[in-house]
Image (tube, grey):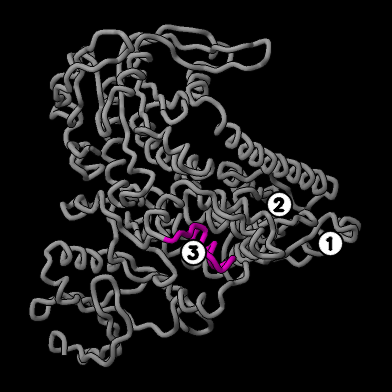
Amino acid sequence: MIARKYTLVREIGRGGMGVIWEAFDQVLRRPVALKVMTPEHATSDSARRRFEREAMAIARLRNEHIIQIYDYGIDEDCPYIVMELLEGEDLEDRLARERQLSPSATLALLRQIAIGLQAASSAGIIHRDLKPANVFLARKEPGESVKLLDFGVVWTVFESDEDQKGSFGRIIGTPSYMSPEQVRAVVPNHLSDLWSLGVITYRALTGRLPFAASGLGELLISICTDPFPPPSSLVPGLLPSFDRFFEHALAKDPAQRFQSARQFVAAFAAGIEASRGPTKILIVDDEQDVALLMTMQFRQKIRDGVYEFIFADNGEAALHELRRHPDIDVIVTDIKMPVMDGLTFLGRVPEVNPFARTVMMSAYGDMGNIRCAMNQGAFDFLLKPIERADLETTIEKTIKHVAELRRNARSDEENKILRQFTSAALVARIREVGPAIALESEAVMATVAFIDIFQFTPVTKQRLPSEAMRMLRANFEVIVPELVAKGGVVDKFLGDSVMAVFQGPEHLTRALSACVAVRAQMAAVAHRAGKNSPYAQGICIGLSTGQVLSGSVGSQAYGRLEYTVLGEAVNTAAHLARAALPGEVLVDTTVHEAAQGLFDFEEAGARNLLPGAPPVSVFNVVRLGPAAFPAAYESTVGIPATTTMR
């Protein structure tokens, strides 16, 4: 008996911190699920706070697709949580039995998972351990209902207690479903949960994980560095459109992923029907003669397979049809309808289908509502009684507009690929001043940092070429996000070195803090991945500041130009990096004097920066000082700034 009211019946599962029992509530006379904290965790104050936070987080989420909390308490110094009792199986058991699911079956699950994730994200709650075992398929009338379980490692965006801060730098979650940013142990957000959902979806469709390795260290490297096998290469008959879907869902860069659960599901639904046939047009009106008019007016195009019409008699039914047919291009809807009117429906269309465009229909006397609809984003309008020529022209115009939207979307995808092979400095320059003067040379004040992988050249001789390049990319995947986060621009990759340039306000302070963060992140990842991992090589950093020349260099005649920066600060930073030992961030006297008070330094002695030149005094950056970014490092990375890799 727990708390003198819950009778334990049988053990039904185990979570990260507790044992889950089927129990009976003696007061309310109903069966419940009861999670009791294990004795070994009950003695830990931090574990108890996490357990309590799990209860509080789920209790805030009153959503049909998240397991509901009934009660929380402490019995004989042992915390417990009382939840609704579910019957069914989790997705892990389903996949173990069936191995693969069809795209339509997967979509049915994703729609429900997305509702739960969207509710959690809106409340500022990140699950951090989304996996098939935490997706429960509850048996209900008339079918299954998905429930998200086990928020035991939940992160709450709007709360900032010491226990949450202490989770930085630790590996949180189930490794196979962790996002690259979880591997790097940075501040979590809802995009990490969407990555995990992408892994779940990939496994459901293909029967295998996108990233698999023999050991934890190799798995972490694979998640951060390796491409995944295209699903269409694993499952015969799976459309290539799913390959493009997963390029977004499992993008290493969070900014390239779907930005919401709704976008995720809408894109997956579009992938199911990507082999486009006739242009689909949805007609929404409760008047039967409108359906007859459309069928008669376009009977030849329907017969030729040019148009396909879908009909609904109110907004609610139309939303259902939009979900069933995610490739609908044109919607023609009346304004006044039962159940859900046209204006309400218009506001709901973008969340289901971002490409579809809506044409409103109404009588001439209802111009006020038509004006309101146009202000809400309607593409065009038709007046009743409908003129056939006006109807044809309006639909054709709308179809052309949607086709242009889709072409632009494809062009954006192509541009994203091109940007991967274009100088980030040039892209930033074009955005700042425009293409006309972007290539003009100028003198600017800047800070330049070189981050070298220590003694990587011997690795290229000891490993296969593919293995050596993979190791190098694994290091860069950790280094680059920290540089970009502080406003740095990766000017170029020089073999096993990264050259980053910081310009604008406080460029020196931002560059120094970025280098300190890079060093700490590399140390943390090396510790987690093991001494034989690519990260164990260590990094050497050199940093200098001053005036540099920026502009394009190369051969214009042969079409080979590169946008870069030149000057003494560039050369000095490169020499300092070569002279640095693993884990050192070396700076010269100029930087040391300029950043006094902002950062703590230690003398690193005299080093030879150039062959034949006399040694010069250099300094190692130890940590951020109190005047730089107060508590910025510990609060965002959670690893002491003095951590080095010696």
Q: CA distance from mark 1 to mark 2?
A: 15 Å
Q: Verify whether residue 607 appears in magenta.
A: no
Is residue 346 in sight in this rendering? no
Give SS at disc 3: helix
Residue, disc 2: 330
Q: Amino acid at mark 2?
A: Val
Residue, disc 3: 200
Residue, disc 1: 295
Residue 591: image location, x then y, percent? 23, 16
Q: Quadrant of the N terminus?
A: bottom left
Count of all numbered marks drawn on residues in the image = 3
Give SS at disc 2: strand
Residue 303: image location, x then y, percent? 90, 61
| Number of residues whose C-alpha sits closer than 10 Å to that of mark 3, classed few (under 14), some (14–19) or many (20 or more) | many
User: Which of marks 2 and 1 precedes in the sequence?
Assistant: 1
Q: Is residue 510 left or right of residue 350?
A: left
